[in-house]
Image (cartoon, rainbow, N blue to C red):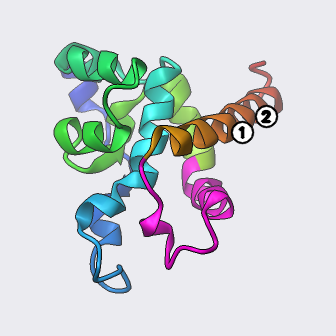
Amino acid sequence: MSALRNKKTIKYDDVNWHVGGDFPSDLDASAARTHIGLFLAWAVTRGLESEMLRLLYPEQMQAVVEGRLAGSEVLRQCCDDKLTNDDFLDLGNAFAQAYYESSYLDDYVDLSDDNLPSIYHESDTPEKLLQIQNLLDKRFQEWKADNGLA
């Protein structure tokens, strides 16, 4: 695991980036975890999580796969509320670098309920996870095809 710690950390998202400023005053910080946690849960259920997460948090990883633990809770419990390259295998990182920063939030907004006051009001539910998983599966397959990995 020392090799994992020696690589440069790339931060894709951080709960602190969302809290404050225009963040809805009627919500607590847990609402800023939802969109990040959904991406993380997708990665875990697709086997793209890092060896470090698997080794340090096997119970949590299994609970996500079984639908007993939300990705937002893994983000809080295991990732210090930050989504980084330390959380993914190489393939997951390559996808996250190409997609997460450039398109994920736009796709998330497109899937969000227009009747809610903000994207932070989206519920962290199994139904929302399924919706995000379907989108991410599609985006992942497109990305792999575009990069000769399909």
| Residue 136 placement, left or right of 49 | right
| Residue 140 placement, left or right of 150 | left
| Residue annotated with mark 1 | 139
Secondary structure of the residue carrying tag 1 is helix
Q: Is residue 10 above or below residue 57?
A: below
Measured Cα–Cα span from mark 2 to mark 1: 5 Å
What residue type is disc 1 on? Arg
| Res 89 → quadrant | top left
- Residue 110 visible in this rendered orientation of the protein: yes
Residue 116, percent across and down?
A: 53, 73
Q: Residue at x 32, y 40 (%)?
A: 8
Residue 104, percent across and down?
A: 60, 53
| Residue annotated with mark 2 | 142
What residue type is disc 2 on? Glu
Q: Using a 10 Å C-alpha cutoff, classify the residue at mark 2 as few (fewer than 14 neighbours), some (14 to 19) or many (20 or more).
A: some
Is residue 112 a member of the stretch shown in magenta?
Answer: yes
Instruction: Point out the stretch of residues depicted in magenta.
Output: 100-124
Name the quarter where the C terminus is drawn: top right
Secondary structure of the residue carrying tag 2 is helix
Residue 84, percent across and down?
A: 35, 43
Q: Residue at x 44, y 55 (%)?
A: 123
Is residue 95 a member of the stretch shown in magenta?
Answer: no
**Main SS of residues in magenta:** helix
Q: Is residue 12 above or below residue 3?
A: below
Residue 19, percent across and down?
A: 29, 73
